[in-house]
Amino acid sequence: MKKNKRNTFWVKIILSLACCYHFPLFANEETVPLYYSKVTIPLPKALQSRMQKYTWKPACPVPLSDLALLSLSYWGFDKKSHIGNLIVNKNVAQEVVDIFRELYSQKFPIALMLLAEDPLFKGSDDAMMAANNTSAFNCRPITGQQDTYSNHSYGLAIDINTMINPYVKGSVVLPPSGYLNRSKPVPGMISKGDPVYNAFISRGWAWGGEWASRQDYQHFEKPSGLK
């Protein structure tokens, strides 16, 4: 009897630890690292210098002091956890952390999450799209409208898996080799009503895939109330 009580006691301990610390009870059970996030305000000086070289100028609509650097976990196409970075408006920083927590918990695959200032891109939106990169801040005009700042310029827009979710306006497709068969879902694709869409829309963001004049499937933006 005493032995059975001891066994029951240790079974309860093991189950409680498994719940809290997420280690496997069985050898073949997959484990997922806990979601990591860090918000850095103000931006590191070295990063500010790179931004002034590639993605930010004094004429931009927000000062560098209004921006936050996020370091976030994301689930890769290799089915492994990675850490990426985004720069967003500091007013939506925690909201974006929470959104990407949801994406991570759903194991929504993200190809790459590097800053626009990375040496691979040097602020080039075309280069980022061709690399299937996920990014946020970049002080630049709206695509096709050189006289109007994009919401990316305010840190209030995020592009996700750009190759799989291209920008489409008539015969214009960006990036040119973007995936167009929206009726056939593939990993990393965003569709109306899916977990990615719901995570953003439930927090008041708008999806470019629902625009009438063009479809920007990669693009989510916060309405202009924060500008």
Image (cartoon, grey):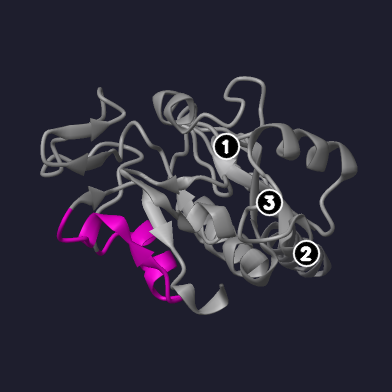
Query: Could you say which disc has been placed on residue 113 in the image?
Result: 1
Residue under circle 3? 34
**Can residue 151 be seen in the rendering of this structure?**
yes
- Circle 3 — which element? loop
Estimate the spatial distance between the alpha carbons at disc 2 and disc 1, rounded to whole Å.
39 Å
Residue in the image at 57% along x and 45% along y: 138
Q: Where is residue 222 in the image (x, y as percent from the top left)?
A: 46, 68
Asked whether 210 falls inside the magenta stretch, the response is yes
Q: Which of 4 and 58 is in front in this view?
A: 58
Tell me which amino acid carries mark 2. Answer: Ile
**Can residue 37 be seen in the rendering of this structure?**
no
Asked whether 221 falls inside the magenta stretch, the response is no
The magenta segment = 193-213
Other residues around mark 1 within 10 Å, as few (<14) / some (14–19) / many (≥20): many
Q: Where is residue 94 in the image (x, y as percent from the top left)?
A: 66, 68
Q: Which of marks 1 and 3 is in front?
A: 1
Tell me which amino acid carries mark 3. Answer: Leu
Residue in the image at 58% along x and 49% along y: 137
Estimate the spatial distance between the alpha carbons at disc 2 and disc 3, rounded to whole Å.
21 Å
Q: Nearer the viewer, residue 189 or 168?
A: 168
Query: Could you say which disc has been placed on residue 13 in the image?
Result: 2
